[in-house]
Amino acid sequence: MHSSLSTLTVNSDPVNSEQSNSEIQPDLRKGKRFMKTYKVTLIDNSRGFQQTIDVPETEAILMEAAEAGIKIPFECVMGACAICQGKVISGTVDLSEQSFLSAREIDEGYVLTCVAKPTSDCTIEVQLDDYL
């Protein structure tokens, strides 16, 4: 695990609360009253797909995508394989729970969507599953 590489920043300017499209919303699922929610845009250029979803800062991108009907392939859901891999085009994500990617892959912008949690509004290139 690369604990010193827990946050990935790619092509982004510092985000402040006045410029961000993020919202603070109640999250009753976790018993928390308020948390930040970020706009995460998922794209698959091979399919001409682009969709933006709201992802709370404590939730993995893959799970919120699945709830929105976006079918990103996955297997382990623990950050230990690369089936759900994506690539950050802009923005930042927390990767502290992943154990599969190398430091080089993280530096190149790769993320595991099953454990990646947004820390800003971001755009991630993914490969959608064939059974759309």
Image (tube, grey):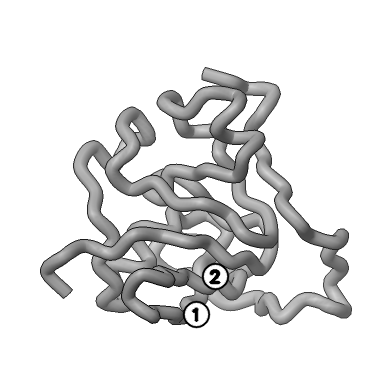
Q: Which residue is mark 2?
A: 40
Q: Amino acid at mark 1?
A: Thr
Residue density around tag 2, few if under 14, some if 14–19, many if 20 or more, within 10 Å: many
Q: On the picture, is 6 further left or further right than 44? A: right
Q: Which residue is mark 1?
A: 52
The residue at the point 71 percent across, 81 percent down is: 21
**Residue 91 lies in what quarter of the image?**
bottom right
| Quadrant (top left, top right, bottom left, bottom right) of the C terminus | bottom left
> Which amino acid, by three-letter code, is at mark 2?
Val
Q: Tag 1: Cα neighbours inside 10 Å, few (<14), some, or many (≥20)?
A: some
**Residue 35 visible in the displayed image:** no
- Please give left or right for residue 17 compared with residue 90 in the image: right
Q: Residue furthest top?
A: 1
- Give coordinates of residue 113: x percent, y percent: 42, 50
Badge 1 marks a residue whose secondary structure is strand
Within the image, what quadrant is residue 107 found in? Answer: top right
Checking the image for residue 37, the label placed there is: none
Q: Secondary structure at mark 2?
A: strand
**Does residue 107 appear left or right of residue 97 in this picture?**
right
Do the residues bearing badges 1 and 2 touch, measured as CB atoms within 8 Å? yes
